[in-house]
Image (tube, grey):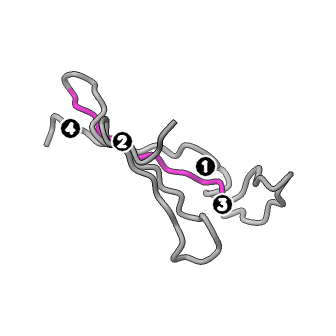
Amino acid sequence: NPTVPPTLHPTDSTHEYIEGREEVPPVGGIAPGGLCTALVLIGVYERHSGCPVLGVINEPFHRRDPNTGRYLRGEPHHPSLTP
């Protein structure tokens, strides 16, 4: 539907994703970089009003196991995360 264009945006660690850099030691239990911090935001908005319709954040390298990628999704009135 041309009134609902999708947008795709690599939100974090694009450089690590492009290089395939994986081994970055955690600092205080938090990974400061590497593939495990790569995120991709996919958003859909209503073209005429600019209002968001749907958003998905994909974390493809959540763990080393390729079957454990995770995603979070949200719709304007049904978010999967609460503040």
Q: Which disc is residue 43 wearing?
A: 2
Instruction: Say few, some or many: other residues with alpha carbon within 10 Å of mark 1 (under 14 / 14 to 19 / 20 or more).
Output: some
Q: Amino acid at mark 3?
A: Leu
Q: Secondary structure at mark 2?
A: strand
Say above or below: 59 vs 68: above
| Rendered residue at 72%/65% (across/down) | 22
| Rendered residue at 16%/34% (across/down) | 3
Magenta-colored stretch includes residue 82: no
Return the disc, 4 or 3, that comes first in the chain's sequence: 4
Q: Nearer the viewer, residue 69 or 35?
A: 69
**Residue denoted by label 1:** 14
Q: Amino acid at mark 4?
A: Val
Q: Which disc is residue 35 wearing?
A: 3
Return the disc, 1 or 2, that comes first in the chain's sequence: 1
Instruction: Say few, some or many: other residues with alpha carbon within 10 Å of mark 4 (under 14 / 14 to 19 / 20 or more).
Output: some
Say above or below: 5 vs 19: above
Q: CA distance from mark 4 to mark 3?
A: 31 Å
- Residue 13 on image: x %, y %: 64, 49
- Residue 44 on image: x %, y %: 30, 40
Cβ–Cβ below 8 Å for labels 1 and 2? Answer: no
Return the disc, 3 or 2, that comes first in the chain's sequence: 3
Q: Secondary structure at mark 3?
A: helix
Return the disc, 1 or 4, that comes first in the chain's sequence: 4
Give the extent of the magenta segment.
Answer: 35-47
In the rendered view, does 3 fall on the left or right side of 77?
left
Q: Secondary structure at mark 1?
A: helix
Q: Amino acid at mark 1?
A: Thr
In the rendered view, does 75 fall on the left or right side of 80?
left
